[in-house]
Image (spheres, grey):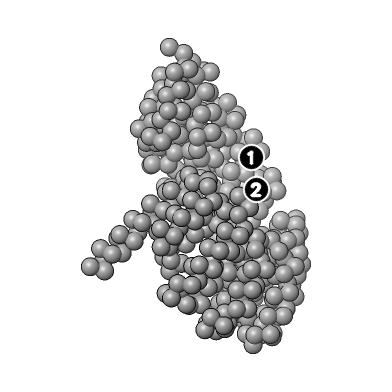
Amino acid sequence: MALRSNLRSKEKSRAALSLLRFEKNPERILDICRAAALTPESHLDRVAYSKAISKLKESHYYEGIREFVKDSLARPDFKSERVVSHFIVLYGQAGLVKDAIKLFDEMPSMGIQNNVKALNSLLFSCVLAEDYGEMKRVFSEFPRKYGLEPDLDTYNTVLKGFCESGSANSAHSILAEMERKGIKPNATTFSIVIAGFYKEEKFSDAEKMMDLMKKYGMRPGISIYNVKIQSLCKLKRSSEAKAVLDAVLSMGMKPNCVSYGHLIHGFCREGKLDMAKSLFKEMIDRKLKPESDCYYTLVYFLCQGRDFEAALGICKESMAKGWVPNMTTMKSLVDGLVSIEKVDEAKEIIGQLKEKFSRNADTWNEIEEGLPK
């Protein structure tokens, strides 16, 4: 009975998520959430909440967000720190940091004790809203005010905020404070800080962090090297990022699909499509499975570079896995195939799209009508 109920709940959540993807009316978005009786205890429901809040924020429907949170928290089954923490984060996602702080302050009056997990959610809320000034204030005042002891997650969240806001140098004092308090950094700590220093092109500071890892008895693994690869690609220094991959291979370490995904995206952004295609082939040869984003990136940029035959090959592979690039990319591919007189291939793609996405069938019928006979 419980299993059947759980399956019904998942079906409702999936249906809500599907409706939310296409709904633009703010009141209708709220109705969908209420009808599905979403709960932050479910992963699928948390995704639906996040989607709803993003759309309501786009519509500047802030009063609706406040009302929705207030109504949700009135539910008797929502009286827990975990649930309140989730709504604190959602306020941050909506850019409503003052509301997030107010909700944190009100926890005791709701019969819920303030704890370090809720504090971490509040700090993360500030980071999501990119309100780094409030993040600093909460970090400096709230532990003392509420008698809370910061933990590793607290420090990692604050480090993320400093590094995202261009203040990676603050990491030195945060790490020193952690050492004083006996809180050992983990791989996530160093990933955040190394990415922060790379973003600011402070490469020697990033290398010092690699040395500090060793001091803590941690061997930099592939996730740390992926941070370096991604950071260099973001700076449009993909050739240097490729050198990092080569160094990883020479050390006998195994790169993963994330390593190649960052490089492929980096070289595509720089217009070096032959290198991107070569890396994609190397990735397949190493028996690594590309993620959906890797396929989407290649198809998009190959179309931009007018290499429509290569784009078609990659797109077919992607669609065989059930991954279809977005409408804009697919329209670009269809138009491109027609421009190189591959009308039959364009029609074949349109046929597959109409079958898979009946919602857009009329649009694709119109496009097909306009193709050369």
| Res. 125 image quadrant | bottom right
At x 56%, y 77%, the residue is: 117
Residue 39 visible here: yes
| Res. 106 image quadrant | bottom right
In what element is the residue under mark 2?
A: helix
Q: Which residue is mark 1?
A: 269
Marks 1 and 2 sit apart, C-alpha to C-alpha, by 9 Å
- Percent of width and height locating residue 180: 69, 85
Tell me the quadrant of the picture where the N terminus can be found.
Answer: bottom left
At x 40%, y 59%, the residue is: 36
- Percent of width and height locating residue 115: 57, 82
Name above or below for residue 311 compared with residue 218. above
45 and 187: which is toward the camera: 45
Q: Give the amino acid at mark 1.
A: Arg
62 and 55: which is toward the camera: 62
Marks 1 & 2, CB-CB < 8 Å contact: yes
Q: Give the amino acid at mark 2.
A: Cys
Name above or below for residue 371 compared with residue 100. above
